[in-house]
Image (tube, rainbow, N blue to C red):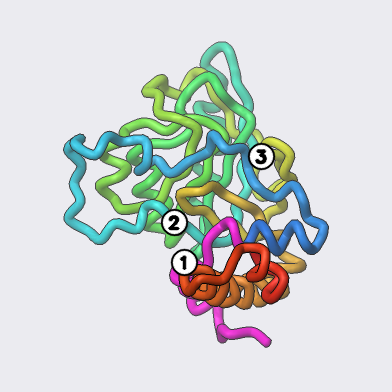
């Protein structure tokens, strides 16, 4: 039985109660074994040294994200295209609340930066996931907007990258992503929940998270791992 009435409650539960390992376990159990994006895609926040100066005046929620995928397909180009950036501005301007910009296909330049963050945030989007680089790191982080990427690199995309399509099917690593799939990310990685099974996955993940708390309490109380697994079926 669903424990949420709308998307806002669903995303709140995901960020407050769930974590990617438990959701990934449920996807594995359901036969969806290739839903994690590559391990090199990490929160931008985690790439910044602790002693670096970053404006942290707002509450820090940059290590977790949950929303619907707005898929974006890019490609590398080797001279300035006739249409600078391709359809990048169009892809940004049509973002909707609770969506996450998910991009892949180009690797010769940064795919994200300060002004893209400002546009996406103003449109109500809740994050960006990039199979590639981000730049303007202090300016991005100061906007308190979760960005997950492979690394930081300042090289500009205007003469190197072309957005050729959006709201299309894409692949990142071994994962196929459809527009509107559920995206969930934290410090342990990013996974994709196919939209047609999202309710079932989340309901089972919530129950597993509760079960893991019981197992930990039992183990801390002296139960062996073998006995705990035999009783709870969780490890």
Q: Is residue 7 magenta?
A: yes
Secondary structure of the residue carrying tag 2 is: loop
Residue 164 position in % (x across, y down): 65, 34
Residues rendered magenta in the picture = 1-22
* Relative to 174, residue 186 above or below: below
Whether pointer 2 and pointer 1 mark residues with C-beta atoms closer than 8 Å, the reply is yes
Secondary structure of the residue carrying tag 1 is: helix
Residue 18 position in % (x across, y down): 53, 67
Q: Mark 2 vs mark 3: which is more N-terminal?
A: 2
User: How far is mark 2 from mark 3, CA to CA?
Assistant: 27 Å
Please tell me which residue is depicted at 80% across the width and 63% down the height of the picture.
30
User: How far is mark 2 from mark 1, CA to CA?
Assistant: 7 Å
* Relative to 169, residue 2 above or below: below
- Residue 15 is tagged as 1
Residue at which label 2 appears: 64
Q: Is residue 228 left or right of residue 113?
A: right
User: How far is mark 3 from mark 1, CA to CA?
Assistant: 30 Å
Q: Quadrant of the N terminus?
A: bottom right
- To which quarter of the image does residue 106 belong? top right
Residue at which label 3 appears: 165
Give the camera-side residue of 111 and 220.
Answer: 220
Whether pointer 3 and pointer 1 mark residues with C-beta atoms closer than 8 Å, the reply is no
Please tell me which residue is depicted at 59% across the width and 66% down the height of the picture.
224
- Residue 48 is tagged as none
Comparing labels 3 and 1, the label whose residue is closer to the camera? 1
Secondary structure of the residue carrying tag 3 is: strand
The chief SS type of the magenta part is: helix
Furthest residue toward top: 79
Q: Is residue 26 left or right of residue 110?
A: right
């Amino acid at each position: 039985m669903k424990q949420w009435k709308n998307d806002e409650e669903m995303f709140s539960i995901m960020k407050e109660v769930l974590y990617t390992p438990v959701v990934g376990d449920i996807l594995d159990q359901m036969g969806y074994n290739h839903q994690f994006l590559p391990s090199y895609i990490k929160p931008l926040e985690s790439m910044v040294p602790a002693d670096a100066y970053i404006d942290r005046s707002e509450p820090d929620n940059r290590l977790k994200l949950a929303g619907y995928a707005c898929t974006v397909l890019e490609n590398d180009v080797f001279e300035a295209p006739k249409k600078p950036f391709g359809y990048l501005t169009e892809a940004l301007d049509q973002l909707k609340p609770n969506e996450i910009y998910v991009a892949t296909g180009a690797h010769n330049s940064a795919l994200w930066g300060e002004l893209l963050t400002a546009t996406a945030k103003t449109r109500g989007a809740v994050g960006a996931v990039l199979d590639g680089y981000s730049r303007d790191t202090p300016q991005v982080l100061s906007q308190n907007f979760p960005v997950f990427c492979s690394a930081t690199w300042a090289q500009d995309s205007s003469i190197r990258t072309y957005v050729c399509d959006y709201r299309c099917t894409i692949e990142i690593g071994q994962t196929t992503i459809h527009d509107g799939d559920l995206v969930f990310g934290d410090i342990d990685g990013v996974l994709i929940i196919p939209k047609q099974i999202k309710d079932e996955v989340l309901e089972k993940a919530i129950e597993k998270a509760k079960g893991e708390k019981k197992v930990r309490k039992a183990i801390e109380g002296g139960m062996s791992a073998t006995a705990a697994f035999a009783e709870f079926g969780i490890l």
